[in-house]
Image: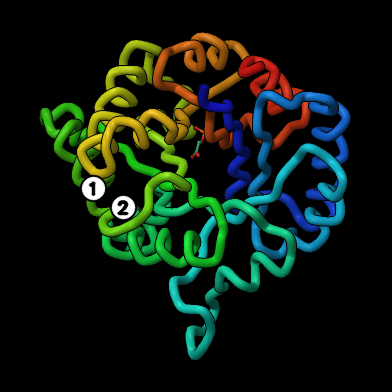
Amino acid sequence: MRTKIVAGNWKMNKTASEAASLIEGIKKEVAGITNVEVIVCPPFTDLKDAAAACAGSNVKLGAQNIHWEANGAYTGEISASMLKDLGVTHVIIGHSERRQYFGETDETVNKRTKAALDAGLVPLVCVGETLQERDGGQMEAVVIRQTKAGLAGLDISKVVIAYEPVWAIGTGRTATPEQAQEVHALIRRTLAEIAGKAVADTVRIQYGGSMKPDNAKELMSQPDIDGGLIGGAALKADTFAAIVKAGV
Ligand code: PGA
């Protein structure tokens, strides 16, 4: 049995003090839930206060990116060890917004994922096709390529995958449970090619893209959908907690 995992991707939202109060709200709502892993991923500048707010609770802390080097002359970048030192346990890697706006490639996704694993952080590795790719019949090829290239040479047993169809992110247009399940099953078959079925069956695959309290349960009840990576609905304690509860 795979433990469900629900993570909030706050993107570039919330100051440090706002983060602390949002986490306080989430903590109250999800207290006592043990069969869903709950993670918040605020911006870097919030992490220290967020770590203090998460301390002693069942809410874990994630970041939204890392650099692949341990330290050095990389102005503006943040390393895995810096995050670990603050109490971060998870990190989003290869989000489509980073691929679209910040030059992220399958190769840099692979390097960042390796750095996360080497440091003992759990990477939430994002894959997903654009609308143009889906309409052009390339969905399968894109998802397989991103999965294989992003994870090449790595121990996938510690990785979480997030399937995020780009056309569903922030658009209010969710993949249907059937559409999402089809791709999640494809990803799991791809993971089985990489590391064998036994390992692939243990890897959690989150769905992301306009997941909300009213569609979360149906999505997460699909056989290969093991949780959610939540954007907009993660910015309010009640909607985020409702999604967590849908996974219980
Ligand atoms: P959304 O974002 O829930 O606002 O669609 C999901 C994501 O980008 O991770």
Q: 206 or 209, which is in the foreground?
A: 206
Residue 137 placed where, x, y %?
11, 28
Name the colouring of the figure.
Answer: rainbow
Give me the residue at 26% from left, 56% from top.
152
**Mark 2 residue element:** helix
Residue 229 placed where, x, y %?
53, 35
Task: List the single residue furthest toward the front.
Answer: 198
Give me the residue at 54% from left, 78% from top.
76
Instruction: State left or right for residue 32 relative to residue 166.
Output: right
| Amino acid on which the number 1 mark rests in the picture | Lys
Query: What residue sits right under mark 2 in the picture?
Result: 151
Residue 151 placed where, x, y %?
31, 52
Instruction: State left or right for residue 36 relative to residue 218.
Output: right
Does residue 208 show up? no
Label total for image: 2
Does residue 191 show up? yes
Query: What residue sits right under mark 1 in the picture?
Result: 148
Give me the residue at 64% from left, 21% from top.
243
> Mark 2 near mark 1, Cβ–Cβ under 8 Å?
yes
Task: List the single residue furthest toward the bottom.
Answer: 73
Give residue 93's quadrant in the image. bottom left
Q: Measure the C-alpha gap from mark 2 to mark 1.
A: 5 Å
